[in-house]
Structures are given as C-alpha cells and as structure tokens.
Amino acid sequence: MKLPVVCIIGRPNVGKSSLFNRILGRRAAVVSDRDGVTRDRHYQNANYKGHEFTVVDTGGFLPDDTIDVLADSVRTQIFNAVEESDLVLFMVDVRVGITKLDQQFARLIRKLDKKVILVANKSENLGDRQESYEFLKLGFGQPRTISALTGYACLSLMDEIVAVLPTPVRGERKEERPIRFAILGRPNAGKSTLLNRLMGEERAVVSDIPGTTRDSIDCTFTANGVKFVVTDTAGLRKKAKVDDEVEIFSNMRTMESIRRSDLSVLLVDCTRGLQVQDFRIITEIRKAGKGLVLVLNKWDILPDKTEKSFDRMVKEMLEREPMLEYVPILSISAKEGLRVNRVIQSIQTVYANCRRVLGRDRVAESFANFLQEKAPPSHNARVVALTRACQILVEPPVIAIETRTPELVDESYKRYLLKKFYEEFQLQGAPLRLNFDQKLTLRKDEELEQFAESSDSVLVGVDPQRDLDRKNRER
C-alpha cells in the first residue's frame, strides 16, 4: 500500500527540519541556525490518530543567482519531492516576514497545481501571530501559525493534514518498511564499489581519486526477499582537513545519514588498517544509537596475507577498542565480490538485535546473577546498591537500572554490566545502552513489542525517551 506523501518546503532556515522532527516525535533531521544544512530529500513514515503517511524534509530553496554550488541540485530535489507529494506544507518565518525569495518560490509552486497549506512558523508569541496575515499575498490562503520548536498549535496542524490527505484503499497489504543502512568510511575505502556490488549495477561513480562521492545517495534493492535502502556517503575526513565548502556539507550530510539509518556499515581499507578517523566514525555511530557492522575491504590485495592475517588484525583492533568484540567484523573484496553476501546477512542480524525484546523476567534474572557474581564497588565508604533492571526501549535497546545513587556507580562497573548483558543476550552490533536512574518505570514485554512493530511508522508527536510537556500538547 502506497502511503500519502506530505512534503515540507520553504526557503532556508524557516524551520522545516524542526517541523519534520516535531511530526515524527524524535530528532530525525539535523537542525541548525545555519542556512542550507539540509540538502537532500529525507523520508520518514509517520502515524497520527491511525492515519499513516510519509513525510519528506527538503533543502532550503535558493535563487538562481546564488553562489551556493549545490543550489541547482537542491532545487531539483525539492521539485521532485513536490511532484510526488499529495500535500505540500509551504513554510515561512513569521518573525522575518515575507521576502522576495518566498514570493519567487510561491509563484513556482502555484504552477504545479498541488494542495498547499501555508505554515507560518516561529509564532509562539501573540505579537508574531498578528503579523502573519501579510503572508496572504503568497496566494495559499490564511497561514496556519505554529511553533515547531515549542509545539504550539502543531496538533491542530496535524488534524488538518490528515483531513486533507487521501484515504488509503482498505484491504491492501501494508508494505513493510525496508532496512535502511549507510555505508561509511574514509575516502577511497571502496564505499561506492560496495554499493554497486550490492545493487548489481553501476549506480555510483567509482574512482581511485579520494572524495569522488560528494553527496549521500539513497538506493533501494532486494536481497533474499528483504527490501533494503542503502546510503552511499561521502568519505569522512578529519575536520582540520576539511576546508572546502562542498566537503563540509558532504561531512554534515554523512552525519545525517547515520542518524536516519537503522545501522551503519563501516568500510575500512584493510591495507591501511583501522585509523583514528575510523574510531571517530564509530563514536558518532554509537552517539546516534545505531547498529554497526565493521567490514575490512580490499582483502584480495592485502600484502603478505596468511590464514592468520584476519585473526591478527582483529586482535589488534580489539586491543585499541575492546567494545569491538561485540561488533560483527568481516573481510571482503567489494571489487571481486568476495564474501559480500555475508555483509547482507550481518546487516539483517544487527537490525534484528537492535529491535529485540529481551524479556522482562530474563533481564531481571540475569541482572541478579551479574550482581551475585560481582557486586558494585563502594564509593568513598558509601555502599552503592543496584536494586532492579528492566528493558525500557528498543531501537536502540536500553536497559534501565534502579539505584538511589546513580552518580556513584563506578565506570568500570558500568563496563562490566554492559559486557555481561552483551554476552548473555548475544546482541552483536546493537548499540546497547544502560541508564542508571533513581526511579525505574517498568515496561511490559508487550509494550516493547508493540513499539518495535510500530517503528515501521513512527508515532507522531511522541518522543519515546521522554513525555512531552503539557504546554506543547495544547492547541
């Protein structure tokens, strides 16, 4: 069943990504005061009051005479998104007022004969809302005043959106959301070559020149009856070495690709080994709470290769980063197709681990055994008591541990518990997190299973990690 599409458009920095995140109830897009942070189309599925739809975040519209070297491609992305949409949210900034760029963009959109709702953002103050009527000149009717940042009137906007959208035909089979993963790595690690191998075609430009890929490219393919969306990203460089504006935004889009994927495949040139920048990428993947598969590419040209080369290389990596023990590590040749099928298998395994419900009783029992095996050390003669544990989230899996003194739990003991949970539940590749809280809210397995199932279409307006403030719920 094809879901209705809602497209968010506007000039730079009017709050498109903030509204996108507000609709999804989580931070799925990069938000910055700097113009032009979003460049590509960003798709996510949403569900509001039983109405499912796809929401699309787009880059900021720029005029033809701009000095921005990526403006043409951004405009192409915007109008492609508008063409395929059932409803367009045209956003303006009520604090700035109507601009020539707003008027130019509005003229172009009116020619496309699309349903449009004019959204006047940053309208949390009464004085700002009173100034919104000047936007009637754009020809889209009365503006809907909201604040994507605070949530003011966002639910009223959502009611109007679902009322306008076409109703899907009943009886059609709901299409499963594909597994989305990003291919990451340093320049010239072979990312585009791996993409082409997975796709079975020359989908991306391949070159020996580092940095050939400047943009994040989304491609869809099917393997073993499972649908995947893979993002080939620009090679991540050290910030000190990035001085070109295009490369700066390429790095930013690569970081955004991590956040909007279910997991990441980190590609490493095995002839050069795991380098400092690779560890930085691993850190960013963990911060984003995403799964990880580590792939050693160009295995076919590794010099002085023996049967023990792989074990020796893995041992060296574990000495530098012990947590890689719980990450699938593969050796492949993307160019020759050597063991590429194992990459897909590992992706499916890690994806499943990220969504696993570990079982409330089993978590409690295992936690008790861990405490019995090794009690938490005291802190300055103060006893540190850990009372109970429960899984509270999936994607990423989070286990909350109750203690009256969370600030006194020793870091080495946290690592011990993390290691024991990984070993007990075989969570290879999943970004397991432990939260130490004074009060534990127990979750039933049924709740977690329902959340995992509904992650195919993220619940609108609900942040899974915290309750929304009541003021933000007011219309």
Image (cartoon, rainbow, N blue to C red):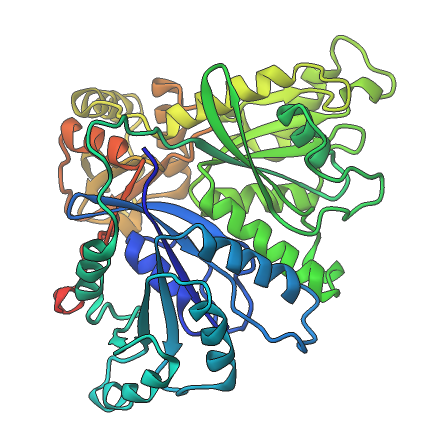
Position in image of residue 398 (x %, y %): 30, 37
Give the quadrant of the N terminus: top left
Residue 13 makes an appearance in the image:
no
Tell me the residue at 77%/47% (across/down): 212
Q: Give left or right: position of 436 versus 340.
A: left
> Residue 222: where, in percent of width, then height?
51, 23
Instruction: State left or right for residue 380 relative to residue 103.
Output: left
Q: Is residue 190 left or right of residue 231?
A: right
User: Picture quarter containing residue 310?
Assistant: top right
Which residue is located at x 20 percent, y 39 percent?
385
Query: In this orientation, which residue lies closer to the viewer: 389 or 200?
Result: 200
* In the image, residue 200 above or below residue 409: above
At x 58%, y 16%, the residue is: 342
- Count of numbered circles on the image: 0
Vertical relation: 317 (above or below) 240: above
Q: Position of residue 282 (x, y in %)?
A: 56, 41
Give the position of the C terminus as an image quadrant: bottom left
In terms of depth relative to the viewer, which is nearer, 59 or 310?
59
x and y percentages locating residue 168 in the rendered image: 24, 39
Instruction: Depth check: give the residue in front, 318 or 52.
Output: 52
Residue 364 appears in the rendering? yes
Q: Looking at this view, is 217 or 10 the one in front? A: 10
Q: Residue at x 38, y 71 (%)?
A: 91
Which residue lies most toward the top here?
307
